[in-house]
Image (tube, helix red, strand yellow):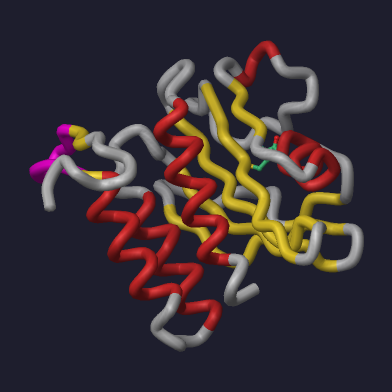
């Protein structure tokens, strides 16, 4: 099945290779496994971080008007465990109901600083019945790290997540 998947790309990683298609299959299995929501969210964050340029991965849930951090994987914790509506790239993605890719966070006035080394960020909302109910937030230590493949891949993960949020 190698190379014939939806995303096609395989990246060199510290330990071997990472294929977006293999990752998508693993994520789909766990999301559909019927496990506890929290356990699934944590697994998804850990798995996504196997992509070499995904430095920090978090999933926020929309609770009332706030975004609340539900699971994360990365070298350190964020102080932004609750983000009020409309704040940051995270808040903007909920309002716009659409993925936001920020190639250079230092040039985006909406950016809420979190980690010193972050250079770019992608936020992908999880949509249900026309509203954003959660989102995947990924920071990268690389400038302009997120390609159209990253966006398509993460949007497909977010569609899967919609079935459990
Ligand atoms: N940078 C985000 C805040 C969350 S942290 O990156 C984990 C933002 O601008 O919304």
Vertical relation: 122 (above or below) 19: above
Between 151 and 53, the residue placed more toward the observer is: 151
**Residue drawn at 58 percent across, 16 percent down:** 104
Residue 91 located left or right of residue 136:
right
Q: Determine whether 148 is above or below 52 in the image.
A: above
Extreme residue toward the top, this view: 107
Percent x, y of residue 112: 73, 33
- Using the rendered image of the protein, determine whether residue 11 is visible from the camera's viewpoint: yes
Q: Position of residue 143 (x, y in %)?
A: 46, 16
Residue 149 screen position, x and y as percent: 40, 33
The residue drawn where x is 19% and y is 44% is: 4
From the viewer's perspective, tell me whether residue 155 is left or right of residue 129.
Answer: left
Judging depth in this view, the residue of 118 and 164 nearest the camera is: 164
Q: Is residue 135 magenta?
A: no
Where residue 24 sits, quadrant-wise, is: bottom left
On screen, residue 59 above or below 102: below
Q: Indicate the quadrant containing the C terminus: top left, top right, bottom left or bottom right.
A: bottom right
For the question of whether residue 146 can be seen, the reply is no
Bounds of the magenta segment: 12-18
Residue at coordinates 58% horizontally, 58% vertically from top-left?
59
Residue at x 59%, y 73% (from the top left corner): 163
């Amino acid at each position: 099945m190698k190379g014939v998947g939806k995303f096609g790309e395989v990246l060199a990683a510290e330990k071997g290779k990472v294929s977006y298609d293999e990752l998508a299959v693993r994520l789909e299995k766990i999301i559909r496994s019927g496990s506890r929501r929290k356990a699934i969210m944590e697994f998804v964050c850990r798995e996504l971080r196997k992509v070499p340029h995904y430095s920090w991965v978090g999933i926020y849930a929309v609770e009332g008007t706030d975004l609340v951090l539900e699971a994360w994987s990365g070298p350190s914790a964020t102080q932004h465990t609750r983000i009020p509506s409309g704040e940051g790239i995270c808040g903007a993605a909920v309002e716009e109901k659409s993925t936001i890719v920020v190639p250079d966070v230092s040039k985006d006035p909406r950016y809420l600083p979190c980690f010193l080394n972050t250079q770019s960020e992608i936020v992908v909302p999880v949509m249900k019945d026309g509203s954003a109910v959660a989102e995947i937030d990924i920071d990268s230590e690389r400038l302009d790290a997120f390609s159209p493949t990253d966006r398509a891949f993460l949007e497909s993960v977010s569609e899967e997540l919609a079935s459990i949020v």
